[in-house]
Amino acid sequence: MAGKKNTEEVEESKKKTGLKKATKKASKKDQKYIDEIEALKLEVGEQKDKYLRLFAEFDNFKKRNMKERLELMKSAGQEVMQTILPVLDDFDRAKKVSDDESSDENFSEGISLLYGKIYSVLGNKGLKSMESTGETFDPELHEAITEIPAPTEEMKGKIIDTIEKGYYLNDKIIRYAKVVVGK
């Protein structure tokens, strides 16, 4: 039995050394291929990283382009609106004069309807007037034309009169209100 064990051990030892020699021969022979596979894996990883970066950059470009288009669409009518504002000012002045009881001027019903329609159409396009009379003066919204002594103590630093209305177009100021401020 002891002889049998030794023979088996010798055979196992030969197998192990044979495997080691075969592995050494194979690894020397195949090392070139293994190195090439590793290099290709690295190259694939780099290409995948470049692809992901390029895809993310393109996605950001699309989002930025979409945002710019929306902004352009929102402000496309700004120039037209700014040219219409003096006409609206004249309309407001005419209405104010006709509403004054001491005035002989009348604002006919047709003109009154037209006045309302113009404001509603422009309002639907995003135009909104600033309410400033009686408000606290804010240099980011108002342009002070002059300062006058305040009629009451509580009107100090507040807007006494609005000379020219300010307007927003889609929550962006397109004209600052020209006002008289109490001091």
Image (cartoon, rainbow, N blue to C red):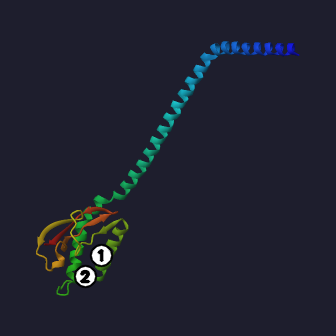
Above or below residue 93? Residue 39 is: above
Amino acid type at circle 2 is: Phe
Horizontal and vertical percent for residue 83? 25, 62
Residue furthest to the left in view is: 149
Residue ID at (51%, 30%): 46
Amino acid type at circle 1 is: Tyr
User: What label does residue 50 carry, if any?
Assistant: none
Contact between marks 1 and 2 (CB within 8 A): the answer is yes
Horizontal and vertical percent for residue 127? 32, 66
Horizontal and vertical percent for residue 106? 22, 84
Say which element carries label 2: loop
Residue position for label 2:
107
130 or 69, nearer to the observer: 130
Counting every numbered tag in the picture gives 2
Above or below residue 7? Residue 122 is: below
User: What label does residue 115 carry, if any?
Assistant: 1
Residue 129 as seen in the image, left or right of residue 13: left
Residue ID at (24%, 64%): 141
Residue 176's quadrant in the figure? bottom left
51 or 104, nearer to the observer: 51
Q: Report, in whole angstroms, how far the alpha carbon at label 1 lies from the one at label 2.
A: 10 Å
